[in-house]
Image: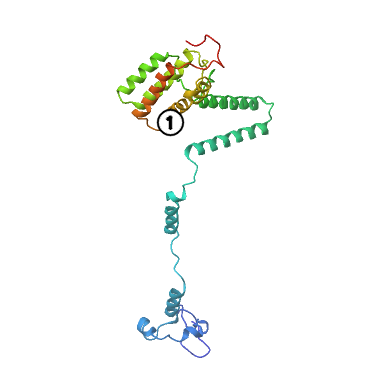
Amino acid sequence: MWTSASGAKPWTSNSHAPPAYRATAPSDLATTPPGADAVYGTGGTATAWLTARTSDDIPVDTSRVPAREAAEDELSKPMYHENDPNLLQRAMDRFWEWIGDLFNSVAGSGVTSPVGLAVIALIVAALGTALWWRLGTPRRTTRPKDALFDSGPRGAAEHRANAEEHAAAERWNQAVQERMRAIVRSLEERTVLDPRPGRTADEAAADASRSLPEHATALRAAARAFDDVTYGGRTADQQTYLRLRELDLGLENSKPQLSGATPGAVE
């Protein structure tokens, strides 16, 4: 048992603290604030007031997970990925990164080592295979995409028959194409034009105009009609076909000028 100097009650082990060392609240907490009696009752302790102050002054720490999820949802919208590389571009980027890593590893291990030489050989073989798969085998001969004749040689009579067949079925685009081919093939058969693979309709019209100047305008118009339906995406009609048919018949009865041809070469 211990007795304080002031003669107060003796202190025992059941007491919270010796009177001389009992903690006191700070001066700003010693006085009960207005309204505290209603919350804590009359004579509320400083500890209760401190608890109230602490709960009011310290901000609440909200979770960051909802904010992160909201940001991820916003960034996942398509409007933020319009300029992203497509799957093929990403695959090519990864492939070239892999190639670069292989070369770096070979350079680190030494090019003269068997492993380095084997890696380089595999890379060259892989690139060659990829190029062959992408480009295919080289072709010996190429045909211009705008060549007049897209198949093997056929006579003018056959082209005329095909043109009439398409016209009877009102397939005017095909009828115009076949009639223009009939015109050019007929001029080649008459040796007005020299047979030349890959010749275009415009070239044929220009060459024929030198020997048949009276038909130059009609020949250029026929070549333009052929180009329009073949490459321009336009649709021919019956009148277009009839103009080419009339030109074909007119050329059959015309005599070319012999300034650029050998005498006796024309039927």
Q: How is the image coloured?
A: rainbow
- The answer to whether residue 231 is left or right of residue 39 is right
Q: Position of residue 177 (x, y in %)?
A: 40, 24
Q: Is residue 63 above or below residue 246?
A: below
Q: Quadrant of residue 218?
A: top left
User: How would you rate the neighbour count of disc 1 (Cα within 10 Å): few for under 14, some for 14-19, many for 20 or more?
Assistant: some
Is any atom of residue 14 visible in this view? Answer: no
From this view, report whether residue 188 is shown above or below residue 71: above
Q: Is residue 222 visible?
A: yes
User: Which residue lies most toward the bottom here?
Assistant: 6
Which residue: 60% across, 26% down?
124
Q: Quadrant of residue 54?
A: bottom left
Residue at image coords 33%, 26%: 171
Q: Nearer the viewer, residue 242 or 181?
A: 242
Helix, strand or loop at disc 1? helix
Q: Amino acid at mark 1?
A: Asp
Farthest residue, direction top: 264
**Numbered label tally:** 1
Question: Residue 5: x and y, percent?
Answer: 53, 89
Q: Residue furthest left?
A: 169
* Residue 134, image x, y percentages: 51, 27
Reading the image, the residue beneath label 1 is 228
In the depicted structure, whether residue 72 falls above or below residue 163:
below
The residue sitting at 48% across, 23% down in the picture is 214
Q: Foreground: 240 or 143?
A: 240
Front-lying residue, 235 or 143: 235
Q: Position of residue 52 (x, y in %)?
A: 42, 77
